[in-house]
Image (cartoon, coloured by chain):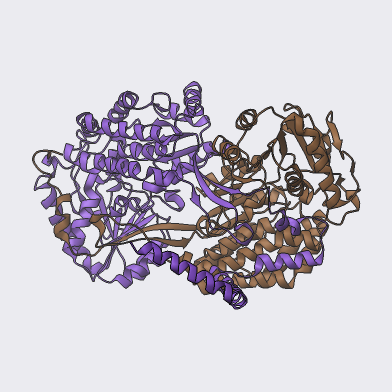
Amino acid sequence: MEREVQRVRAAFGSGRSRPLTFRRRQLEALRVMVQEREKDILAAIGADLSKSEFNAYSQEVITVLGEIDLMLEKLPEWAAAKPAQRNLLTMLDEAYIQPEPLGVVLIIGAWNYPFALIIQPLIGAIAAGNAVIIKPSEVSENTAKLLAKLLPQYLDQDLYAVVTGGVEETTELLKQRFDHILYTGNTTVGKIVMQAAAKHLTPVTLELGGKSPCYVDRDCDLDVACRRIAWGKFMNCGQTCIAPDYVLCEPSLQDLIVQKVQEAVKGFYGENVKESPDYERIVNLRHFKRIQSLLEGQKIAFGGEMDEATRYIAPTILTDVDPGTKVMQEEIFGPILPIVPVKNADEAIQFINEREKPLAFYVFSHNSKLIKRMIDGTSSGGVTGNDVIMHFTLSSLPFGGVGSSGMGAYHGKHSFDTFSHQRPCLLKTLKREGVNQLRYPPNSQSKVDWAKFFMLKRFNKERLCLLLLTLLGVLAAVLIKRYQAVLRTKALLIFLAVHRRAIP
Amino acid sequence: MSAISEVVQRARAAFNSGRTRPLQFRVQQLEGLRRLIREREKDLVGALAADLHKNEWTAYYEEIVYVLEEIDYMIRKLPEWAADEPVEKTPHTQQDEAYIHSEPLGVVLIIGSWNYPFNLTIQPMVGAIAAGNAVVLKPSELSENTASLLATILPQYLDQDLYPVINGGVAETTEVLKERFDHILFTGSTGVGRVVMMAAAKHLTPVTLELGGKNPCYVDKDCDLDIACRRIAWGKFMNSGQTCVAPDYILCDPSIQSQVVEKLKKSLKEFYGEDAKKSRDYGRIINSRHFQRVMGLLEGQKVAYGGTGDATTRYIAPTILTDVDPQSPVMQEEVFGPVLPIMCVRSLEEAIQFITQREKPLALYVFSPNDKVIKKMIAETSSGGVTANDVVVHITVHSLPYGGVGDSGMGSYHGRKSFETFSHRRSCLVRPLLNEETLKARYPPSPAKMPRH
């Protein structure tokens, strides 16, 4: 493991990932890989999560292709030095922030979107000029094996290496030194990753989870709301970090919500959900049993059917859920939707704030004031109002958690920035030493008074310009008065010269 | 519950009360801080003089003025920075509101350092307050006069529950680090940085670590040595070398070494006179342990200037070492004292190689009239930040974030970056409940065949 990391580090040390043309070529090769080997990729995802080709494409592959295209388009702009605003003392100097690669980045993937959650961060890490070690989740083993096979066929083999294996291999890997670690997974392992990173002072981006609440206001179109909630909840069989975990609503809405979610589910998956090619399965037996146990003692409004052999769990809604029960103590990560009745929006806000900050917050209402109030009154990684999941899809929005749901963010430019060191540079000249005289010892009161003048007077640009213009104006007036005669002659000469040119 | 736990819980309860949310409240607190500085400047100077032999001028220039600037800047810009930031939308999201909403994190812990004990505790605090957090301060116990002064005067000017000061040594700091915070900013050594990050990991607390390293200073053969050496001497020997961004050592061609020494000597005499011990402007080493440590680095070295010390006053003369061996102790740890080693390298390439074989420093300095040399040095090395043809000053520009990389730290602050560091930038996408037609394509059932694409 150590040797592998050394090899990758040496490749980074060679400097070949620095030129933008090299990084472009790698990203283009990645795109070719995704396009040429689409069938293999979709098949692997399908094998891991019982996912249809269409879903695998629309949930994972499309996102990745979009990110590659965006990165290719924007790379020159994002990698360029950004001029920084100067102050009075540095007005004549060059000041800018230069993005540079960090070095060797470790990306640890999750099993629920095994392709996208590795490749999307990888795109940013490559674009920022780093070498990357990729550790896909062993739980989604088909995708892991495929990535180990495909990536070396398309990308530089020494700069971008895939390491596969389980807990043991990951532990070994985490003993090595990296320049950044991006981990997607659960809170507990997130702590372990950060502790390992602390030994080497490695900065981390942790994309974790939590219970993403979904508040449904009485003033909203329940048909639309419930369809959107059902879509986001049951996609990938509930195994989505930003799935709406549970619903909060007034008791009077509960039955209606159950009815409309049930209708939506029927519309999506048909009468016999088990037969629908669009409905996925739980990734393994351990998670199947875990989710099964969450139903104990609950009021099942619909669903609840299970088949251990195929790891099938039907879309299920629970009503009048007691916040003290197991299903409300951990992130469900399965197709179970608990409804917890609350009196009103304020009680919902209180409920949410008593718990760990979630990765996402959802609120459905026609009342935009209410939406704003709920956003202001809570905290979460991100928010989508009147829909679910979608804030993930806009790459200009940083995607990440806060508190227990994570730290740092990525997607689009935020990926590029996460995997770069933004290095501030101030370039002065060896001239104009006069300006510096005030700072050298020996010190005196007059020096300090001058320093106060220069540094603390609020010379905003407009005032300074006005001052300068006034001075110039005065100067011009004085000069013109003095040299009126000379100026008149000169003006006449210029006029004649221009006139002569203009006449053919 | 321990006293420390109680203090932190009280700060959290005060944060939860919501009173830091309105911008007006935050501005009031910042104005309180500004008043504190203006009204108690004498006391501050007194504490800094007792801790580090600073006088009213060095205390002002090197610490206080930057905090005042930061407060002014923060108050002016707060409405702009705290506002929702709209982001670029895609065709699919044209009908939606998409923006980044900045919110406070909660309770922030700031662990200060002893070398600029006022600035390094209060300047980060300005950003943390502006971002709407409660802030627990833990000043360094080594600069004990400043630490006890802060504990006395801060509650007189700021909200007492939201911004408590906790003093104490290693035991108290360890206690504090067991508590849960929403962000920790630590300024200090790499070794303790690791301890802080480990403690933070238990609560998944994000950290900003302002650490250190050996900041190289490359002096090109062709540059104006008078000016270069004056600037280097100023940055190196201020605060008796106890500055995280001080030029740690010089790299230069052997042919100019003696000239560099002469010009450094000349500047030092101009600054501090023949005997720096008599100069009001020359600092002292913070304590005996560091005094012994720095004096120890001189063993076996060729001392071109200085080299003397007085343990009772913890004075170490401005010292220059020549022909330094990279293996010797003075080149193995951050000097953090008034000892300037000069190491000879034969070319820019050799200097670059020397630098890149070592840990990434907090700052990098290069003196040259040739822009190509400067650009090459920057392009082929890494460091927290860079100043070319001067030292230290890149950290005084608001728009340049101040922080390290690799062993010299993670995260950054100053100006807007402070505000962002201490905020959660929350992505918000607010859609209408209409336009269900346009979303139809995303709902199952999927088309019978995979569409050609």
Horizontal and vertical percent position of residue B20: 52, 69
Q: Is residue A273 above or below residue A219?
A: above
Horizontal and vertical percent position of residue A429: 64, 48
Q: Nearer the viewer, residue B135 or A121?
A: A121
Q: Residue furthest top?
A: A3
Report the side of B307 relative to A438 (left or right). right
Q: Quadrant of residue B428?
A: bottom left
Residue sitting at x 25%, y 39%: A61
Which chain does the brown colour mark?
Answer: B
Residue sitting at x 33%, y 32%: A139
Q: Nearer the viewer, residue A471 or B84?
A: A471
Q: Is residue B120 above or below residue A120?
A: below
**Chain A appears what colour?**
purple
Report the side of A326 relative to A97 (left or right). left
Q: Nearer the viewer, residue B432 or A489?
A: A489
Q: Quadrant of residue B257?
A: top right
Q: Is residue A166 above or below residue A457?
A: above
Q: Nearer the viewer, residue A119 or A114?
A: A119
Residue A334 in sight here: yes
Q: Which quarter of the rendering shows the C terminus of chain A?
A: bottom left
Q: Quadrant of residue B302?
A: top right
Horizontal and vertical percent position of residue B253: 72, 31
Query: How many numbered discs, if any?
Result: 0
Residue sitting at x 40%, y 64%: A500
